[in-house]
Image (cartoon, helix red, strand yellow):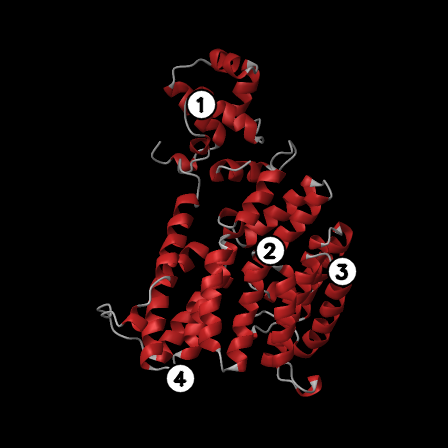
Amino acid sequence: MDSGELLPVGRRVAYWRGRRRLSQQVFADRLGKSKSWVDKVERGVRSLDRVSTLHDIAAVLRIDAAVLLGREVQPAGVTGRGEGVERLRVALSRYDIALGRPAVRRPVLPAVELARQVAHAWTTFQHARYPQVTELLPGLLADAGRTFAGEPVAGRAPLVEAYRVTASLLVKLGDPSLAWLAVDRAMNVATGDPTLVAAAAVQLGQVLRAGGQSRVATSAMLTAAYRIAPPVVEFGLPPELSLCGTLLVQAALAAAGHGDARTAADLLDEAATLAARVDDGQDHHRTGFGPTAVDVARAAAAVELGDTAEAVTWHDTAVRRDGWRWLPAEHRAAHLIDVARAHLHADDPISAGRVLVEADRIAPAEIRHRPAGRDALAQVVRDPRAPTTLVHLAVALGVG
């Protein structure tokens, strides 16, 4: 089966049944199915759309269920993600500059080139290519530290941005404690520059929320937001309005996280006022802030508060906006996972499955590499009506 990934699942079943020297009747008996059922599966007339059935077939054939789907036996992404996080842990634990250790034998990047590489890492993250970002960041963090040591003024912003994208990635990958170290480094380097502090505070909010410190997050985000807020909103520039608005959104989501619906709504209304002055299609300071982002945040807050109907209403509003397609793929797919969670809370796995299929189309890594996405997938495929594509994905990932 050198070209095995080109074969349909039913053909794979037939292939491995032949390898095990089982007749269709014996195979059917061991599965507790009819010979006709086996024949239809092997001819592709009947689809295998339940995780449990795929596992039963794999057990009889003495192979891993993922082999039936033409995937690696190791659940996709599990090993690679763990190794990548460990490399980031090592990178964040180094203090070569402070301790005066000999520099690695590689040229120190000029600040301009470093900024270009950091921008590339951000773009890769926003396209939800998390394995690639994980590979980039350890070396980028080392380069950023050396550049900052040689050019403390010009190298400051790129170093803060390198820590910011690292923190965002680690939150995605489900390691808020390590993300805390990255964001703490960012805040320390940024100290003294109000704009850089506000930018780093966006990730601080993400980390605090991911770590279950929602009340602390609300307070910290409000402090950061009002420090960067322009004295007169009408005269504020889009970059500072974007930072202020994004921090208000983080504060609102944190408030929703501890059940304070009124504060969440008030803060989102305030953010919407700023968003109207920024408009959609912008990405100042990698925030993606605008009216559509605020609608997406309203949906996320509703999910946190357990209001499924409200979450779906705001989702429908967001996706009808022109600004929806301008949001980064990472942002859109993450939102869809939130919406899937809302449907699951309402005991509607079918709607949740449809949303996850769309999330997987936009940014596959949101389900394959993000724990929240994998958890939602596992819940959806427990329903016998789950889409076959999601069932196969769940088997390949080893969830469900």
What residue did someone put label 2 on? 212
- Circle 2 Cα neighbour tier, 10 Å, few/some/many (<14 / 14–19 / ≥20): some
- Disc 4 to disc 3, how far (Cα)? 42 Å
- Disc 1 to disc 4, how far (Cα)? 65 Å
What residue did someone put label 4 on? 153
Give the mark nearer the N terminus: 1 vs 4: 1
Disc 2 marks a residue whose amino acid type is Gly
Q: Are marks 3 and 1 in contact (CB under 8 Å)?
A: no
Give the mark nearer the N terminus: 3 vs 1: 1
Q: Is residue 280 visible?
A: no
Q: Mark number for residue 261?
A: 3
Q: Secondary structure at mark 4?
A: loop
Q: Are marks 2 and 1 in contact (CB under 8 Å)?
A: no
- The residue that appears at 47% across and 67% down in the rendered structure is 184
Q: Mark number for residue 14?
A: 1
Q: Is residue 105 visible?
A: yes
Give the mark nearer the N terminus: 3 vs 2: 2
> Which marked residue is nearer to the observer: mark 3 or mark 2?
2
Give the mark nearer the N terminus: 2 vs 1: 1
Disc 1 marks a residue whose amino acid type is Ala
- Disc 2 to disc 1, how far (Cα)? 49 Å
Which of the two residues, 167 or 70, is positioned nearer the viewer here? 167
Image side of residue 204 versus residue 232, left or right: left
Image side of residue 375 versus residue 313, left or right: left
Q: Are marks 4 and 3 in contact (CB under 8 Å)?
A: no
